[in-house]
Amino acid sequence: WEKALELLDVMACAKMELDRISFNAVISACELRGEWEKALHLLSVMRQSGVEMDRISWNAAVSTCAKDGEWRKALQLLNEMVHSSVESDTITFNTALSACGMDGVWKKAWQLYSLMVQAVVKLDRITCSTVMSACERAGQWVKALQLFKVMQESKVESNVVTFNAGISACEKGGEWEKALRLFNEMALTNVESSRISFNTAISACEKGDAWERALRLCSDMIHSKVEMDTVSFNATISACEKAGEWERALQVLSEMTQREVQSNAVSYSAAISSCEKDGKWERSLQLFSAMARGKINVCTTTCGATISSCVKGVE
């Protein structure tokens, strides 16, 4: 990019006419290097030189700001572009959206999406994925699901990212049944479920006290090609613990050990708590001892549940 700038300076000093192609090439070079300040300076020089900017000029400048996390600058440029004679396109908006998404500014992302709809700019999978993810991370599950519905109505093809964002939004909103509907819809649309898909769906069931559904998902995951991790098992154990299904909880913990998935304090705490609720103090002590052997850090909650279990056993 530095060579490109030098060449532009040489052309200016030689009083050669600088055209749009020359400026666009250098702005694009700045984009590749993330030199957003240089890119904005070049846009200013273009204006002063009376060189008309086109979509390439704007898109490259917006992209430069977005890549460097300068979402405010990116939105400012987009706003200028919208009010100029140059028509913005899906690429322009998606670039600005990516900046908002990376910085977690879901309200701005939603405003951009709304502006796209008003300007009748075509929505694509990147648009929807970015806005949905921003809303999901901010706990705005209603808006995330609203956008997922728009995707379906607009016949925008969904992928694992959009489905995961939708499932996660439902999980955060306590809507476990909706989360399962979206999860099941993945198979119907030939979208392969990922570990995140399974884990989020299991977590949604755990939060919704739907332990049987959580177990079924865990079983499906075991028999699928998706590799389970600590989160997968912990969410299932916790679902069983909440339902007082201590035997099921221990079975899942045993499966976790057999598959050599790393257990942690959360795994054992949930299992011990499930035994404590049913008065299985001997099981609680066995699990507590296993934690010590496995050099797993014991927390206050685990100790409390184990002691409570022993007290109940004495009574």
Image: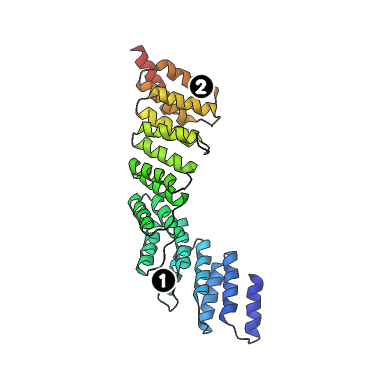
- Mark 2: secondary structure: helix
Q: Are dots 1 and 2 in contact, CB under 8 Å?
A: no
Q: Residue furthest top?
A: 314
Q: Position of residue 172 (x, y in %)?
A: 37, 44
Q: Could you tell whether 49 is left or right of 309 in the image?
A: right
Q: Position of residue 244 (x, y in %)?
A: 35, 25
Colour scheme of the picture: rainbow
Q: Position of residue 92 (x, y in %)?
A: 47, 67
Q: Amino acid at mark 2?
A: Ala
To which quarter of the image does residue 82 belong? bottom left
Mark 1 vs mark 2, CA separation in Å: 61 Å
Q: Position of residue 90 (x, y in %)?
A: 45, 66
Q: Amino acid at mark 1?
A: Asn
Q: Number of callouts in the render?
A: 2
Q: Relative to residue 305, is residue 65 depicted above or below?
A: below
Q: Is residue 182 visible?
A: yes
Q: Is residue 104 visible?
A: no
Q: Residue furthest bottom?
A: 15
To which quarter of the image does residue 198 belong? top left
Disc 1 crowd, CA 10 A, few/some/many (<14, 14-19, 20+): few
Q: Which mark is residue 79?
A: 1
Q: Relative to residue 260, is residue 286 depicted above or below?
A: above
For the N terminus, the quadrant is: bottom right
Disc 2 crowd, CA 10 A, few/some/many (<14, 14-19, 20+): few
Q: Relative to residue 40, is residue 296 depicted above or below?
A: above
Of residue 116 and residue 36, the one placed in the foreground of this image is: 116
Q: Residue at x 53, y 37 (%)?
A: 227
Q: Residue at x 58, y 78 (%)?
A: 21
Of callouts 1 and 2, the N-terminal one: 1
For the C terminus, the quadrant is: top left
- Mark 1: secondary structure: helix
Q: Which residue is mark 2?
A: 290
